Image (cartoon, helix red, strand yellow):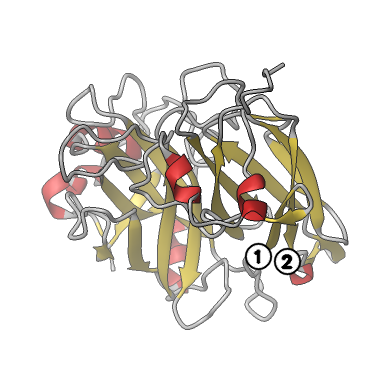
Amino acid sequence: MIGAGVGALGWDKLKGRRPGLGLIALCLVVACSESFLPAWAVIDLRAVAALVEVEGKPGRARPDPGDDVQVSILVVDQGAPASDEQGVPSLTPDLLQWAFAACVPLPTLIGPPICGDVIQPCDGCTGTPPDDRLAFPVVRFQVPSAAELQAAGADRVLVQGVICADGPPAADAIIRFILGETDDLNPCEDPNDEGRFVSVTIPIEPTPDDPNLHPEISNLFLDGRSWPPPYDQSVPRTAPREGCKADLDGLSDAEREKHPSAGSEASSIELSVTEDSLQAYIVDEMTRTEEMQVSWLTDGGEFERTFSFITDLPATVLTFWRPLVDVPEDGLLVRFNFVIRDGRGGTDWVERGLCVLPAPADESPP
């Protein structure tokens, strides 16, 4: 299960190498943008969350030694313009290629985690290109045994690697990143392709009799009402950024009016989680209750904040989002991603969309 060679990408170079001391801002929690825009503003490719699932143990957020796990990574981007090629749809995000390694970390005390022994096999780790060209990164592997983890002094495992849009990752950069040599790296073979380094830390469950479970988003309300169709469950990956007005043609007047106009007043967005999401747990013989961190992300308009926190019941939180002042005549599709984390490895996320319409002819945006 644990080895030093993983084939084509040259993971065998990990064996016997001393990791470098370079540091990197890992891209999983909030952002990997070089801009100074607020972190809620999705303007480029980003890996914003990872969901760990344990085979045969529904709802578990952290595995036991020997468990089979699946790690799904949420990748977002700003909505794409309509394709200029006949019969070729736009895609948000673009076609993805990736390369990952699952591994047991070295017992470092400071800096980002660094891979030690590589875990083999890892299904989906080197899906470049994936069998399903529209797939998102999903990797599967078996956690090492308790004896193997103890011998390595590890209480967690890692998934580390690279995601690129419309091109393959750079093999040498991936290896150097996993070794901790993180200075002056381009994640993709073509430096013009967008790419992101990703590191996912997966804690081993210390209390199997009282395991941490994933939290769950139960409701999302827009201005105190249910989220309007047609983007009330998700947004099609093929939906272009402009032209959403036609998607509202089959809606009732009441449903269509829930979609905002350019320059209108800010809308409230209320998110709630299930009561069971706020789990009690024991640390140093003290009982504590999880606090839920909510990340608000959008590719259009403005949120009043990037994060909110749910600390007690009722398990709900509210923020405000203001639409853009000017949009195309045929409407602008705005994508939203809402991510919750319990601070102990538990995660959930949902995607929604709104079609921002031009201001009525008799009104002027403020």
Residue 8: where, in percent of width, then height? 11, 49
Return the residue nearer the eye: 360 or 173: 360
Q: Amino acid at mark 2?
A: Ser
Q: Position of residue 313 (x, y in %)?
A: 88, 61
Res 204 → quadrant = bottom right
Mark 2: which secondary structure? Answer: helix
The residue under label 1 is 216
Q: Which residue is mark 2?
A: 277
Residue lying at 56% horizontally and 34% vertically, measured from the top left: 357
Q: Amino acid at mark 1?
A: Glu
- Residue 304 sits above or below residue 133 on the image: above
Question: Quarter of the image containing the N terminus?
Answer: bottom left
- Give the left or right position of residue 111, taking residue 288 as reference: left
Image position of 226 (left or right of 150): right
Q: Residue 99 location in percent, x, y?
A: 26, 47
Question: Toward the viewer: 2 or 358?
Answer: 358
Quadrant containing the C terminus is: top right
Are dots 2 and 1 in contact, CB under 8 Å?
yes
Q: Residue at x 35, y 21 (%)?
A: 183
Q: Residue at x 66, y 73 (%)?
A: 207
